[in-house]
Image (cartoon, rainbow, N blue to C red):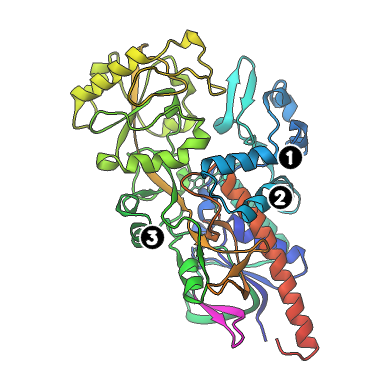
Amino acid sequence: MSDYDVIVVGAGNAALAAAVSARENGAARVVVLEKAPREMRGGNTHWSGGVLRFAFDDPREIGPLLPGVEDEFVDFYDGIQPYTGADFHGDLMRVTSGQTDPVLSRVLVDNSKETVFWMNTVGGIKMEPAVTLTGVRKGNKVVWARGLVVRAEHEGVGLSRSWFATCERMGVEVRYGAAVIGLLLDEKGHARGVQIRDDEGLSDVLGRAVVLGCGGFEANVQMRTQNIGPLVGAAKVRGTPHNQGDGLRLAMANGAMPWGQWSGCHATPISADWGNFAPRELTDRSNRLSYLYGVMINRRGQRFVDEGEDGAMFTYAKYGRAILAEPGAKAYQIFDSQVVHLLEPRYSTSEPLTSDTLEGLIAQMDIDDKKQALLTVQEYNARARHATEGFDPTQKDGLSTSGLALEKTNWATKLEKAPFYAYTATGGITFTFGGLKVDENARVIGTDWRPIPGLLACGEMIGGLFYDNYPAGTGLVSGATFGRIAGRTAAQIQSNSRAMELEGVGA
Ligand SMILES: Cc1cc2nc3c(=O)[nH]c(=O)nc-3n(C[C@H](O)[C@H](O)[C@H](O)COP(=O)(O)OP(=O)(O)OC[C@H]3O[C@@H](n4cnc5c(N)ncnc54)[C@H](O)[C@@H]3O)c2cc1C
């Protein structure tokens, strides 16, 4: 006899989407097992910016998600470009160099808009314009980054809170401090439950289907070092300390197939002044993503990336790792007074160095070669452009340096207007790209290339979608899409198993 119809492991966006979907699709007894105590619940989802990337043909399709938005923003829809399924899939292909899983990426893109509307209507998640992150003011109008207009109200904190409220309303049981440490398969190889460790000790929780939504291995230093390498091993963690790769290890110990880029991760430029784990109350405020308006130099005083290669939403997830590869895993981002008003509000969580001269600024930096740093900035200035030549922060403006060994290809304005500012940066890991192989129904595939019966996975646990890089706002939509699918599949499995039991076939 099973205790539950569906067991969901983890309590982030993907897991709670699965729990809600399982209930919606007819599973009566659904339990969520969350390792963290209640006050730490919600996983990376709590830390997230809540931004949601999805495809739409006409900007006005977004309207129902944002009631009253035209009162708040003048000519709101004029600042939004259509973002079709082909655009979204094209972005995924481009940033992953064509390596994104062909089946899973199609499922993600094709369901993206419907998923966000489902989060809103069934999930009870209110939405708001993602103005502080993806909107750039042009006159009295706001121009929005393509595909990135909407976020959950009150960002990840609001998203997580809303999921828990909906679970409660729908009668989903949530158990905190319940760490899943084992997976129970019956003699037919069907997932029948899990072993947990909580304040009472060890016990088994039995069910008819198990959904794993318990995150990647980004907070586990040993797994980071072993799979991604020592540089990323030393990275600061941007989200929950609880995502230690438990679910991945358990599933693989029971025959699940690893899939995707296990040597890859999402790592962004963050303030180097933060500790090894981001404080929960400051959520994603560590990010330092306005480097495209300035230059970044390492401890040797040299630039090391094309800061203007693309919009930050298409480079931030790989430039954190690029900083980790530099000496001391540290860089400085330098800006002048022409662009400092464009820095994201999140920069206000640290104090910059300031000076009226570039020499004075560099003199204050904790770097090894200050002479080279000044030369680098002078060389850059000699090859950079004046803002009057067409600087446009709302799009790739083609304002490139010319003649540098490492060009800056957009937004390359001279650092010429005092005072000057410098912010520290290092790499912060967000999540890992390696995961399990699942099919389009979120069923976990074994190393024998067959589904492991009764076992589903969703969220960061799925491998294959992201390689080397990632388009911003995709993690949450992917999590909710595959969480919803996993919940639906789990509800179907439990209903079949119940029917077989009634017929006396043996569950
Ligand atoms: C700072 C930051 C900002 C971000 N901003 C965005 C954004 O704006 N847009 C976007 O799309 N993505 C964003 N992301 C990425 C996004 O947060 C993740 O892709 C998403 O939250 C992952 O959801 P998940 O449900 O898979 O995992 P999580 O939300 O991390 O949930 C995993 C849960 O599993 C639990 N768990 C772990 N092990 C066990 C175990 N053994 N037993 C029981 N429970 C366990 C954990 O405690 C946790 O609650 C951001 C991430 C961070 C860190």
User: What kind of residue is marked 2?
Assistant: Asn
Q: Is residue 262 above or below residue 197?
A: above
Residue 134 visible in image:
yes
Measuring 37% from the left and 37% from the top, which residue is drawn there? 271
The residue where tag 3 is placed is: 220
User: What kind of residue is marked 3?
Assistant: Asn
Residue 65, label in figure: 1
Is 183 included in the stretch rendered in magenta? yes
Q: CA distance from mark 3 to mark 2?
A: 32 Å
Residue 93 % position (x, y): 57, 43
How many C-alpha atoms fall within 10 Å of the one at disc 2: few (<14), some, or many (≥20)? some
Image quadrant in which you'd find residue 133: top right
Residue 111, label in figure: 2
Residue 310 % position (x, y): 50, 30
Measuring 48% from the left and 79% from the top, which residue is drawn there? 200
Secondary-structure class at tag 3: loop
Q: Is residue 452 above or below residue 391?
A: below
Residue 179 visible in image:
no
Q: Return the disc, 3 or 2, that comes first in the chain's sequence.
A: 2
First to last magenta residue range? 182-195
**Nearer-the-camera pick, 409 or 346:** 409
